[in-house]
Amino acid sequence: MAEAYPPSTSSTASSSDHEESWLTKSGEDEDDEVEQVEVVSLFDKTRVFPSAAAMLADCKERFGFDFLGVLRRHTKEGTPLPSPITADHLADDGLLIPVLVDDALIFCLDELPESASTTGEANGSAPLHQKQGAGEKEKQVPSVDELLQKNAQLHDELERLTKQFANYRLAVEQTLEKRWGVDEEDEKAEGSGKQNGGQRQGGEPSKTTTTTTTGSGSGDAGKEGQHEASAYYFESYAHNDIHETMLKDRVRTEAYRDFIYTNRHLFSGKTVLDIGCGTGILSLFCAKAGASRVVAVDNSAILDRARENIIRNGLDDIITCVKGKIEEVTLPVEQFDIIVSEWMGYCLLYEAMLPSVLFARDKYLKPDGLLVPSHTSMWLAPVSDAEYVDDTVSWWRDVYGFDFRAMQSGICDETRMAVMPAQSVCGSAHAFRMLDLHTCTVKDLVFTDKWRSEVKNLPEGEEVDGFLVWFDCFFAESREEKVEEDLSAKEWVSKGKERVAFTTGPFGEATHWRQGLCLIDKTKHKAVDLGEGKTLEGEITYEIPEGHERGLNISITWGVEAGKKQRQTWLLH
């Protein structure tokens, strides 16, 4: 094949086509003109090599002579030069005459590779025989025992990395198999749906859906809607944003961390079940605290990232990740010493995750096992904040000079999640329900409780604008430790050494849960004549709305003590 010679550096853009064709020669002409280099061995003149590098490699291999090393030692680090060096040392013209006439090695010196010692210095490491100073002995070669010890350390490190890589590979394989399996099931379902015709669009229902060929259409639609809502719930936890918000909630995350690390004696050598593990932070806390085995369960796709987080932090030999609903999965451990979970939702029970924790408690927790957290309490207080009402409700009446009052329709029908200032609370807070998580049941999560509040700090001429709902969370060290029903988190912590608890209410640091604000619809309800020291009373009801299995309806009745009561329901769907 024709090969172009490198163009001359003096060539210009005006070169002719003739000159360009002249630069291109056949391979045969090039081979004829290239002079073959023959380098003679330093030790055997009968041995000839095509390059200096090949010759020196042969000298080193056959005769144990490192030409470059000798040069480096004698010219840079080796044998001392005559002192002083005089002109007589350099006057001998014999130094300019090569031993071999036209010795090719002389012309190839610039092409020789760097010696091992020079390369080592360039990389920041010392040469093998490094001089310690004038008159000092060379460094000793490592002993056999040192080399064996180093070899053992490297062997252990290799085993650790091999195991970590195997676990990571298994995690990737499981993830891919899961995704491929879902794709295959979807394809099969789509084909079956086309054949049967009567199935909903997209094929057969998912495995978690119960279907029937009889009954009313509205009932089937209701069930389908519930399952879609449940699927959306798990899907919402597959993205980074929500986990970043929760992890950056210092009140929440540090409470778990402080309880686990402060009570290492409770976790050391114990088995732990983490329900709804998310990114795996609570599992990592438990493993660091000395747990012998942690099983992290989540039905969201975030579990794939949790598994990688665990592997990257070198705790995959302790923590096992399991994908699925806690009610459906098969766990590698039959019973656990501790169950840890961050299950709390807005107003505590929104999202309905607590029933899953109670299911796991009854099935997997040892009789003397511990739940973390152990207790939660729910609180209510009246609020008065005219500025907030003006900013969120009344302002629709004048939007850049236009009346948008139509936008106020239904504006007070839903529970608002807000961080309200402490001064907006205009009555004493009332703890209307305490849940001991070791003993409560699912039936305890739907209820109607009484509440009372003594009015105080109500500005003159102002009225109650609504009610604020929040919860406190407690971390007891044993099942026997009791939490008084009317104690706030702050009061409970102050009564014991190194106790851990937190509040989501207006009197503490803000959390991502905020508070549930139930604004009174003043177009339907009359203002209550209140004064300092009067008592408001009523009932509060928590119930699950039909068709929204993870939603929450909050109903409150209120009125002066022994007076007529008014009632309103707020939605949290």
Image (tube, grey):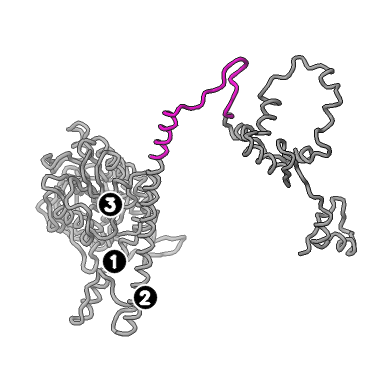
Picture quadrant of residue 188: bottom left
Question: SS class of the residue under badge 2?
Answer: helix
Residue 292 lies, with reference to residue 87, above or below; the image says below
Q: Which amino acid type corresponds to the residue marked 1 in the rendered image?
A: Ala
User: In the visual, does 143 lie left or right of 352?
Assistant: right
Cα distance in 3D space between marks 1 and 3: 24 Å
The numbered mark, 3 or 2, whose residue comes first in the sequence reads 2
Residue range of the region highlighted in magenta in the rendering? 127-155
Kindly identify the residue that appears in the image at 32 percent across and 81 percent down. Answer: 193
Quadrant in which the C terminus is drawn: bottom left
The numbered mark, 2 or 1, whose residue comes first in the sequence reads 2
Q: Name the foreground residue: 395 vs 348.
A: 348
All told, the count of numbered labels is 3
User: What residue sits right under mark 1 in the picture?
Assistant: 229
Q: Which amino acid type corresponds to the residue marked 3 in the rendered image?
A: Ala
Disc 3 crowd, CA 10 A, few/some/many (<14, 14-19, 20+): many
| Horizontal and vertical percent position of residue 427 | 21, 45
Disc 2 crowd, CA 10 A, few/some/many (<14, 14-19, 20+): some
Question: SS class of the residue under badge 3?
Answer: strand
Q: Name the foreground residue: 570 vs 439.
A: 439
Kindly identify the residue that appears in the image at 52 percent across and 23 percent down. Answer: 140
Cα distance in 3D space between marks 3 and 2: 30 Å
Circle 1 or circle 3, nearest the eye: 3
User: What residue sits right under mark 3 in the picture?
Assistant: 296
User: What residue sits right under mark 2 in the picture?
Assistant: 187
Q: Name the foreground residue: 240 vs 50.
A: 50
